Image (cartoon, rainbow, N blue to C red):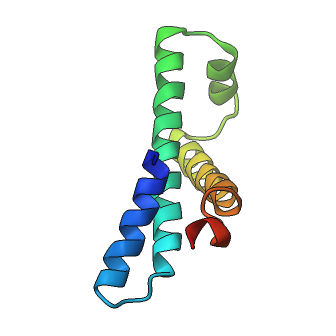
Amino acid sequence: MNLIQTIYCSQYYDLKKNGRDHTKGRTNGTMLVAAMMLLILVSVIVLYNVYIPGNGMDRFFRGTGISGRAMGKLLGLGGLAALYALLNFTVGSKASYD
């Protein structure tokens, strides 16, 4: 069992044990895994920009003219939505969760 399946199963069993609606565990698990993957991705990008300055990605983010806060909100929300959709149709599908 891998980490993603462990997160989904723990959500399922915890909710089912307490007598609550276990289908909400699918949404919670998908959101949790998407947030974890996004944090790992952002960490890799930041480390890449720190240790290899002047790369194409660094120039792209600095040349947009958008403030750092707005860029973070835009990339965070877009990245989270994209990862959630990807996970929702692959690992977190209804058939896989059941």
Identify the residue shown where x is 54% and y is 27%.
Answer: 45
Is 72 positioned to the left or the right of 78 in the image?
A: left
> Looking at this view, is 96 or 84 the one in front?
96
Residue at the spot x=53%, y=39% of the render?
Answer: 68
Query: Which residue does the image show at 53% across and 53% down from the upper left?
Result: 34
Residue drawn at (46%, 20%), measured in percent from left and top?
Answer: 47
Q: Nearer the viewer, residue 91 or 80?
A: 91
Residue 30 versus residue 79 in the image, above or below? below
Task: Give the side of residue 80 with respect to residue 46, left or right.
Answer: right
Count of numbered marks:
0
Vertical arrangement, residue 55 with respect to residue 84, above or below: above
Left or right: 69, with 14 as reference point: right
Near-viewer residue (47 or 97) = 97
Q: Position of residue 76 (x, y in %)?
A: 56, 50
Q: Looking at the picture, how far across and down is residue 63, in whole percent? A: 69, 26
The x and y percentages for residue 22 are 45, 82
Q: Tell me where residue 3 appears, x and y as whole percent.
A: 43, 47
Would residue 24 appear left or right of 71 to someone viewing this image?
Answer: left
Q: What residue occupies the far front of the structure in this picture?
A: 1
Rendered position, 1 above or below 14: above
For the residue pair 93 and 71, the one nearer the viewer reads as 93
